[in-house]
Image (tube, rainbow, N blue to C red):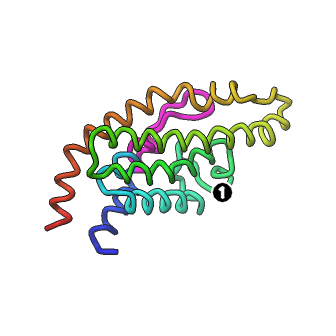
Amino acid sequence: MNTKRVVFTSASTFLIIIGAYLSIQIGLVPIVLTNFFIILIGIVFGWRVALLSILTYIILGATGLPVFSNGKGGLAHILGLTGGFLLGFIPLAFFSGLAKGKSIILRVLLPVIGSIILYFIGVPWAMFVYNNIIAPGGNKPLWDLATTLKYTTIPFLIPDLVKVVIAVAISKILEPVVDNFVNN
């Protein structure tokens, strides 16, 4: 790995951390800019930097550093309600990274595919954690799929699509600048 890629990966990991701190709490799962930065990083730098950045982010959080939304960290957070979404960031980074240098349609489509996979990992994870860890201790009603989607997915679909569109627009400006820097 060359020095420029190490710098890009470190800076990208920092942006992902910043994205986690930029959050709006709505219910149990906050709207964060983490996925926006993952998509942007993937499209601009490619899948290798995006994957290394998100893996670094998850490892930093797993060690207890407060890098996740609302300044959380630790294995308990990864194993908690939003842990599946954190792990879902990995395919989001990969698919967004595949969009580097592609047409506008693929720059939108690949991150959307990554986001769908993120939800396919995060939703059942959240339902499992809620039904087996959170609800039994508080005598709360269990979540069925519709309830889980109500709290973990539906409020985020439009904001996530807007994040994809904005990331694609910004990538059209940043990608040539970054490519020029890398090649010189």
Residue 36: name its quadrant.
Answer: top left
Depth check: give the residue in front, 83 or 137: 83
Residue at image mark 1: 75
The picture quadrant where one finds residue 169 is: top left
Q: How many marks overall?
A: 1
Above or below residue 3? Residue 161 is above
Residue 55's spot in the image, x, y percent?
A: 50, 60
Position in image of residue 137 (x %, y %): 84, 37
> Residue at 59% across / 34% down in the picture?
29
152 up-or-down from 175: above or below: above
**Quadrant where the image shows the C terminus:** bottom left
What residue appears at the point 36 percent right and 62 percent down from the top-left corner?
9
User: x, y (%) of residue 47?
Assistant: 39, 58
Please report the residue visible at 44 percent of the width from the left and 54 percent of the height from the top. 94
Residue 61, relative to residue 82: is it above or below?
below
Q: Determine whether the residue tagged by mark 1 lies in a helix, strand or loop.
A: helix
In the rendered structure, the answer to whether residue 11 lies left or right of residue 24 reads left
Q: Is residue 69 above or below residue 7?
A: above
Q: Does residue 34 show up magenta in the picture? A: yes
* Pointer 1 local density, CA inside 10 Å: few below 14, some 14–19, many at least 20: some
Give, as a single range, the part of the protein colored magenta: 16-37
Q: Is residue 83 left or right of residue 42?
A: right
- The percent coordinates of residue 92 (x first, y second) are 47, 48
Q: Amino acid at mark 1?
A: Leu
Task: Identify the residue at horizontal 58%, vertical 44% (top origin).
Answer: 85
Given residues 99 and 88, the one toward you in this image is 99
Q: Quadrant of residue 1?
A: bottom left
User: Image check: 3 left or right of 89?
Assistant: left
Q: Is residue 140 magenta?
A: no
